[in-house]
Amino acid sequence: MTDFSRRAGLGALIGLVATHAQAQAPAPIQAEAGWSRAAGAGRTGAGYLTLRNGGAADRLVAARAAIATRVELHTHVHEGGVMRMRPVEAIEVPANGSVTLEPGGLHLMLLELKRPLNQGDSVPVTLVFERAGEVQVQLAVQSAGARGPAAAPHRH
């Protein structure tokens, strides 16, 4: 076998392995319908959204946002008939499934806001997944009493 043949064969093998590795890479997680409620500077805000996973099971393990000193993953639990928020280590995102972060359930806590969250603002947040890596999401800030994201305008 000539030197050229060996190099050509090795190049083809490397290309095949790289193509196979790309095909096996975890599908990206899509973050949809991100929203938050209006809140004052120095206060605590929350983030809600739906995570859709088109691949293998994954876990949301962290989040960060420039607007907050820190971001924690939280859930609500019932203790003695009272709902309390508790931090969680991770949020499971099932294979080929979804999970919704919503009031009264799993959510992001935006702690020590550096500036107010004003209705109409859009707040960038970086979500960090165990397998999928970083995913960017925008939280659309609703009124302080909002119970969900603003409805999309109807098209006629």
Image (tube, rainbow, N blue to C red):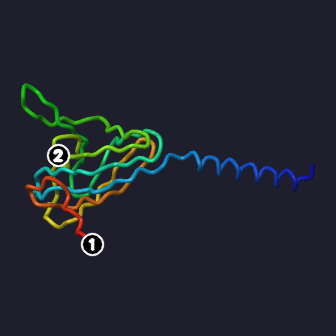
Numbered disc in front, either 1 or 2: 1
How far apart are the alpha carbons under marks 1 and 2? 28 Å
| Furthest residue toward front | 156
- Residue matched to label 2: 103
In terms of image quadrants, where is residue 33? bottom left
Q: Residue 4: give x, y in percent of width and height.
A: 87, 56
Within 10 angstroms of label 2, few (less than 14), some, or many (20 or more) residues?
some
Above or below: residue 105 compared with residue 9: above
- Residue matched to label 1: 155
Residue at 19% across, 66% down: 121
Q: Amino acid at mark 1?
A: Arg
Residue 139 vs residue 113: left or right? right
Q: Secondary structure at mark 1?
A: loop
Above or below: residue 54 compared with residue 143: above
Residue 14 vs residue 27: left or right? right
Residue at 25% across, 41% down: 73
Q: Are the residues flagged by discs 1 and 2 in contact, CB closer than 8 Å?
A: no
Residue at 39% across, 44% down: 129
In terms of image quadrants, where is residue 66? bottom left
Q: Residue 79: give x, y in percent of width and height.
A: 11, 27
| Furthest residue toward bottom | 156
Q: Amino acid at mark 2?
A: Pro
The first of marks 1 and 2 along the sequence is 2
